[in-house]
Amino acid sequence: MPNLHYLLGNTCPNALKFNTAFPFHPSTCLPSNLNPAVNEFASSPPLKVLRLRVSAVNLVFDVTNPRGVLVADVFNAIFGYLQNPLSRDVYGGLPSHVREATDRAYHCRLQGASSRRIQGINEGLALVDCLGERMHFHSLTYSPSHGVWDVVLF
């Protein structure tokens, strides 16, 4: 198992402020002295593929880079995959309390995007909305039984 970059492990969570509902920008998510670190390899040794899982929305995806996955690749992939549309069938199958939390998260996300003039977000219901208030990145932890890196959110 490779070693993770410190921005992806649990050794640096207080410095990182990444809300996965919005695009990752180093200038708003990290102290300025850590901005260059996002262009470093996500693991040592560098891997061309990292398989991630967001278990709260049953999402597994690969982050790829033929030269080696970078920290920024990981953050951008998490945002991108969580912007996938939430189908009516999945939404309808959610328990009522989860649907209510999803609706609140959706409205907060759109309101936040509008007030901050953020572009590039899905304007319909998205997987990220199912996370409710637990949409902030904390770290990745390896799950050997599944061979994936779990995205830990708070």
Image (cartoon, rainbow, N blue to C red):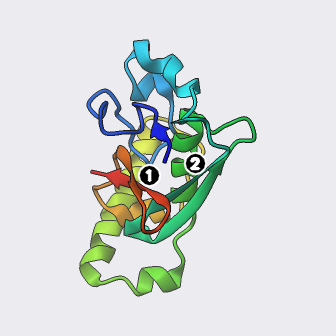
The part of the image, by quadrant, that contains residue 129 is bottom left
Residue at horizontal 51%, vertical 30%? 25
Q: How many marks?
A: 2
Q: Residues within 10 Å of mark 2 (few under 14, many from 20)?
A: some
Front one among 8 and 44: 44
Q: Which amino acid does the dot numbered 2 rest on?
A: Ala
Pair 2/1: label in front:
2
Front one among 6 and 56: 6
Distance Cα–Cα, label 2 vs label 1: 20 Å
Q: Is residue 141 above or below residue 87?
A: above
In the rendered structure, find residue 128 and report the number of the disc placed on it: none
Q: Which amino acid does the dot numbered 1 rest on?
A: Leu
Decide which of tag 2 and tag 1 comes sooner along the chain.
2
Front one among 73 and 19: 73
Give x and y (percent) for residue 98. Answer: 29, 75
Q: Is residue 98 above or below residue 41?
A: below
Q: What residue is pinned by disc 1? A: 110
Secondary structure under badge 2?
Answer: helix
Give x and y (percent) for residue 87. Answer: 54, 77
Give x and y (percent) for residue 35. Answer: 48, 19
The part of the image, by quadrant, that contains residue 70 is top right
Residue at horizontal 46%, vertical 38%? 3
Name the residue at the right extreme: 66
Residue at horizontal 47%, vertical 61%? 53
Give x and y (percent) for residue 46. Answer: 61, 36
Secondary structure under badge 1?
Answer: helix
Q: What residue is pinned by disc 2? A: 77
Locate residue 67 relative to residue 47 in the image: left or right. right
